[in-house]
Amino acid sequence: MFAGPVTFVKGVVAMSGLPPADRLEVCFAGRSNVGKSSLINALTGRKSLARASNTPGRTQEINYFALGETRYMTDLPGYGYAEAPVAVVRKWQELLKAYLSGRQTLRRAFVLIDARHGVKAVDEEILKLLDRSAVTFQCVLTKIDKINRAERMAVIEQVKGALAKHPAAYPELVVTSSEKGEGIETLRAIIATLE
Ligand code: GTP
Ligand code: MG
């Protein structure tokens, strides 16, 4: 697992609430309902550390988790949730943009892509922002248990094609299922070895 205990630090609603930038940080970004909170739970081996739910738009703050004393992991509000009130969406977007482009210690952004849907226009917006901010991002396919082998090969091709256009993209994809555990150890190892 990770070196040291995993603990919830705080939920942040504005840039002024971020904890001191004193350690390496990774974040989990992605469309609403893509499986960010579930992935964090699977990675940490804790069933309900991050709140996961069937209701899109569940995570409305930047939730900070400490992995031992050397790194932070953040669970971000999902983007692209059409049902949310406009004012709320705008507030999340502003926070998300400020965070992704302005957090000095953010070493890698994991951008989650639902294996059933591939990279969508709303994802492209975030990928472009990460390019502009020079934040290395790595795509993580989620819910791989929901598709068959042929669909899996097709979505991997689609995502790789999309990544080729982005200078900040880390070329390797991680294929995961929080439900079945696929790819979880791989992702854990990536996070643990970042420096
Ligand atoms: P927001 O916080 O609303 O942006 O959502 P989120 O990205 O945190 O998604 P969350 O983890 O809450 O998961 C959304 C739904 O997808 C839940 O019903 C999960 O049980 C389901 N889910 C997440 N990961 C997987 C997976 O790997 N496989 C399957 N089958 N379902 C998953
Ligand atoms: Mg969530």
Image: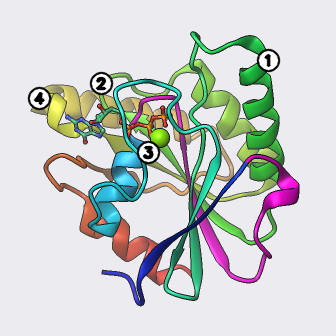
The disc, 1 or 4, on the residue closer to the chain's N-terminal end is: 1
**Label 1 near ligand 1 (CB < 8 Å):** no
Q: Residue furthest right?
A: 16
Q: In the depicted view, which residue is nearer to us: 92 or 101?
A: 92
Q: State the residue position of label 3.
A: 36
Q: Amino acid at mark 2?
A: Arg
Q: Mark number for residue 148?
A: 4
- Provide the secondary structure element on which disc 2 rests: loop
Q: What is the quadrant of residue 154 in the picture?
A: top left
> 114 above or below 6?
above
The disc, 3 or 1, on the residue closer to the chain's N-terminal end is: 3
Image quarter where the C terminus lies is: bottom right
| Disc 3 to disc 1, C-alpha distance | 23 Å
- Provide the secondary structure element on which disc 3 rests: helix
Residue 119: x and y in percent read: 48, 28
Q: Residues within 10 Å of mark 4 (few under 14, many from 20)?
A: few
The disc, 3 or 4, on the residue closer to the chain's N-terminal end is: 3
| Disc 4 to disc 2, C-alpha distance | 10 Å
Q: Amino acid at mark 3?
A: Lys
| Disc 1 to disc 4, C-alpha distance | 39 Å
Q: In the depicted view, which residue is nearer to us: 53 or 125?
A: 53
**Label 3 near ligand 1 (CB < 8 Å):** yes
Q: Mark number for residue 87?
A: 1
Instruction: Find the magenta span and give its range.
Output: 13-34
Point 65% across, 78% down: residue: 24
Marks 3 and 2 in Cβ contact (< 8 Å) = no
Q: How many marks?
A: 4
